[in-house]
Image (cartoon, rainbow, N blue to C red):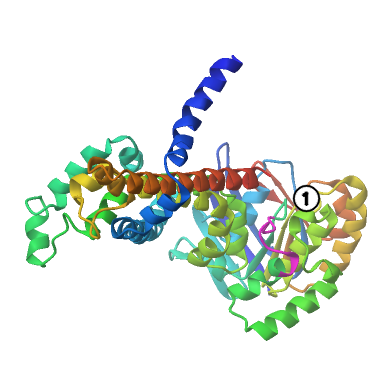
């Protein structure tokens, strides 16, 4: 499965123009803040429409301004891990992870089994009934990742998933994240402007600056 | 400074305490058991519940649209939605009469369908909704405007459509503010007097709500009933103030 996009979107100070093919596995998306990285992820997730262009995941067209196609975010099966994780504060850890399965109307018994398996895999089973507001940064990050991956998304987008962590936690979590992402076989875009992320995640790297995407 | 503060507090507390001092517990119980009091209590309970239900069902979408949608005239609609808060209730009553009364603008149409609104229990609900709904709409609007949009975006990327995101994310997160607004609306509906007496009249069991019963019984010199019902209204008011404060504190925490 390959994620292909060739899109244009007008931003305040420049126009984002980005075209690339993202194969399965991790692609690091680098560049300074305000260069359009988050906007590109939001375009791919369907949270905003492109002004022009096309986005396709394998054979499936997610957006095409030429044919006025626009698949809404809830029908794309593209998971996005937000920078501050955006965990639902009124739900406990298990319910956060379960959310995407409820969205897909997975039957309750199967839902419970998949949540349990995912919590085990991310070593957060002991936190199942904890409120997400009580978690440490590293734990939140794992819940966010578990919530995104439990639905088996067709593509995974991570918006600076380590930036919200304190430096000492960050190195440990970076290693864990690298191990998890190594086992995922869908197009994955990892946004970062931290040079330390190059070694584990930078086998393929794209650079985005002032709306211009380059290798 | 302290004296001025104490003076104002005493000014508020003394008359309310005086209400309680004005009646013995047995006379209070007896007054509440009279048919007039029982009818008023029952009518107020029913009408304020319906008013609250109508306000929640119609006010929630309105508040959401006002908070989120951008359309020409949004600010005007916004101002109109607030208007009943500042319009004198008696004026609201006359306006409702002119609109929905037998000789009102919509009177002939309603009459054709066999509906007569004015001087009925339905008129009580209309009067209450008119004056009290804006309190809920205001609270809900600011809650929806202040909601964390990232959480709604997260819900969407996890596969929840807009309606379910609203139900599972937006509403639960806004719940304390919605509850506070609902309590205020209910309290305002319970105390509604001016618009009700103008538009719905003052018929026992039909349109004589608690405040109207207080007024009528005071006029007809039945002081115990007026006093007892007043105490009930003050007790509800105390409950409302406490409830609103508690939710505000919980929200701040």
Percent from the top left, x then y, of residue A53?
52, 58
The vertical placement of A118 against B51, above or below, is below
For residue A60, what is the image quadrant?
bottom right
Q: Chain of mark 1?
A: A
Magenta stretch encompasses residue A87: yes
Which class describes the residues within 10 Å of circle 1: few (<14), some (14-19), or many (20+)? many
Residue at left offset 63%, top offset 65%: A4
Q: Would you say the magenta stretch is mainly helix, strand or loop?
A: loop
Q: Which secondary structure, mark 1?
A: loop
Q: Does any portion of residue A101 appear in the rendered image? A: yes
Q: Would residue B160 appear left or right of B35 to someone viewing this image?
A: right
Question: Which residue is at the front of the view, B83 or A183?
Answer: B83
Magenta span covers which residues?
A: A86-94
Percent from the top left, x then y, of residue B226?
33, 45
Q: Would residue A175 appear left or right of A84 to someone viewing this image?
A: right
Q: Would residue A172 appear left or right of A93 to someone viewing this image?
A: right
Percent from the top left, x then y, of residue B109?
9, 60
What residue is pinned by disc 1? A192
Residue at left offset 55%, top offset 55%: B175
């Amino acid at each position: 499965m390959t994620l292909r996009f060739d899109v244009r979107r007008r931003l305040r100070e420049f126009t984002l123009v980005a075209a690339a093919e993202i194969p399965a596995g991790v692609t690091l998306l680098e560049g300074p803040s305000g260069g359009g990285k988050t906007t590109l992820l939001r375009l791919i997730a369907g949270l905003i429409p492109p002004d022009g262009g096309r986005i396709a995941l394998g054979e499936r067209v997610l957006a095409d301004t030429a044919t006025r196609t626009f698949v809404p975010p809830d029908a794309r099966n593209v998971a996005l891990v937000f920078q501050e994780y955006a965990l639902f504060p009124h739900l406990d850890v298990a319910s956060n992870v379960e959310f995407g399965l409820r969205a897909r109307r997975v039957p309750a018994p199967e839902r419970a089994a998949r949540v349990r398996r995912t919590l085990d895999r991310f070593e957060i089973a002991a936190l199942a009934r904890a409120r997400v507001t009580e978690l440490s940064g590293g734990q939140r990050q794992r819940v966010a990742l578990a919530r995104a991956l439990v639905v088996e998304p067709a593509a995974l987008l991570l918006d600076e998933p380590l930036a919200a962590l304190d430096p000492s936690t960050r190195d440990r979590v970076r290693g864990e994240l690298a191990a998890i992402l190594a086992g995922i076989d869908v197009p994955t875009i990892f946004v970062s402007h931290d040079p330390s992320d190059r070694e584990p995640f930078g086998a393929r790297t794209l650079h985005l600056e002032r709306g211009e995407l380059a290798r | 400074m302290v004296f001025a503060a104490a003076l104002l507090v005493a000014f508020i507390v003394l008359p309310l305490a005086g209400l309680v001092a004005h009646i013995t517990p047995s006379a209070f119980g007896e007054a509440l058991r009279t048919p007039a009091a029982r009818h008023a209590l029952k009518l107020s309970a029913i009408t304020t519940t319906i008013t609250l239900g109508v306000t929640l069902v119609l006010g929630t979408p309105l508040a959401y649209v006002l908070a989120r949608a951008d359309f020409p005239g949004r600010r005007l609609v916004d101002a109109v939605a607030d208007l009943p808060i500042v319009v004198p209730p008696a004026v609201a009553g006359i306006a409702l009469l002119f609109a929905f009364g037998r000789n009102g603008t919509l009177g002939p149409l309603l009459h054709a369908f066999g509906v007569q609104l004015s001087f009925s229990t339905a008129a009580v609900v209309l009067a209450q909704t008119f004056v009290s709904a804006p309190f809920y709409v205001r609270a809900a609007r600011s809650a929806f405007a202040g909601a964390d949009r990232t959480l709604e975006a997260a819900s969407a990327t996890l596969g929840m459509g807009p309606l379910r995101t609203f139900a599972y994310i937006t509403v639960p997160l806004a719940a304390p503010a919605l509850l506070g607004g609902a309590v205020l609306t209910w309290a305002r509906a319970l105390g509604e007097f001016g618009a009700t007496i103008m538009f719905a009249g003052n018929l026992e069991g039909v349109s004589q709500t608690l405040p109207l019963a207080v007024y009528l019984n005071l006029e007809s010199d039945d002081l115990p009933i007026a006093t007892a019902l007043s105490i009930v209204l003050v007790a509800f008011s105390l409950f409302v103030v406490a409830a609103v404060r508690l939710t505000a504190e919980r929200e701040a925490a």
